[in-house]
Amino acid sequence: MAIKKYDIINVEQPDLSFWEKIYLPAIGKGLWLTLCHWFSRKRTLQYPEQRREDLPVARGGLRNSNYRGLHRLNKDEQDRVACVACFMCQTACPADCITIVAGPAPWPDREKYPVTFEIDELRCIYCGMCEQACPVDAIELTPIYNHIGLTRAEMIYDKDKLLEVYDQTKDLKPRRSPDIVGYTCDRRREALDYWNKIEQKTSKI
């Protein structure tokens, strides 16, 4: 398809003034900005002697409630994994770093649970979309930012590792909605009971 004439925009190079051609005003502005930062308050931390979690948020400190660090899998009030293997976090992940293998749940209040749950922390971009997509508040990002591994295999966190992270950080960052798993299951039971009653009424008619 040919390009139409009204889609063509001619861009001409602007004429520079004498001072713009010699660049002295621009150099002076840049040096002035550098001097202003030179005498301003420093925000550089001497890590690891100084750490962000020891500072207030106004001075560049770490806010535990919304920092996106190492992942964890939450547990419910019965100390079970809260994940219901709905694959929403795996679907929403833009880096494709989550792998889930679902299986029939051994508990009566849910249909599935993750037999395998792995996150490749090297591939992850820590965007938090998995946390937002989870309908049962099972996966969260924690304030842990200094996790290391000597090999690539050590940076692939399986279900056991993610549950261990929850045990380490549950006091530092409590679960936002600990009752949401039971709420979802109760709503599912109510919906099934409702439709079963409707089927019974229609079968009698």
Image (tube, helix red, strand yellow):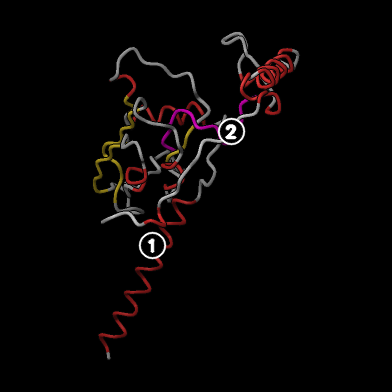
Q: Quadrant of the C terminus?
A: bottom left
Tag 2 and tag 1, C-beta contact below 8 Å:
no
Q: Which residue is mark 1?
A: 188
Q: Quadrant of residue 116?
A: top left
Image: 111 above or below 82 = below
Q: Residue at x 61, y 22 (%)?
A: 21
Q: Quadrant of residue 58?
A: top right
Image: 199 above or below 132 = below
Q: Residue at x 49, y 26 (%)?
A: 168
Q: Which residue is mark 2?
A: 15
Helix, strand or loop under label 2 = loop
The boundaries of the magenta stretch are 60-74
Residue 37 is inside the magenta segment: no
Q: Residue at x 36, y 40 (%)?
A: 94
Residue 66 is inside the magenta segment: yes
Q: Residue at x 31, y 37 (%)?
A: 96
Which is more N-terminal, label 1 or label 2?
2
Q: Quadrant of the N terminus?
A: bottom left
Q: Amino acid at mark 1?
A: Arg
Q: Quadrant of residue 159?
A: top left
Q: Amino acid at mark 2?
A: Asp
Locate residue 42 relative to residue 151 in the image: left or right.
Answer: right
| Predominant SS along the magenta part | loop
Q: Residues within 10 Å of mark 1 (few under 14, many from 20)?
A: some
Residue 111: numbered disc: none
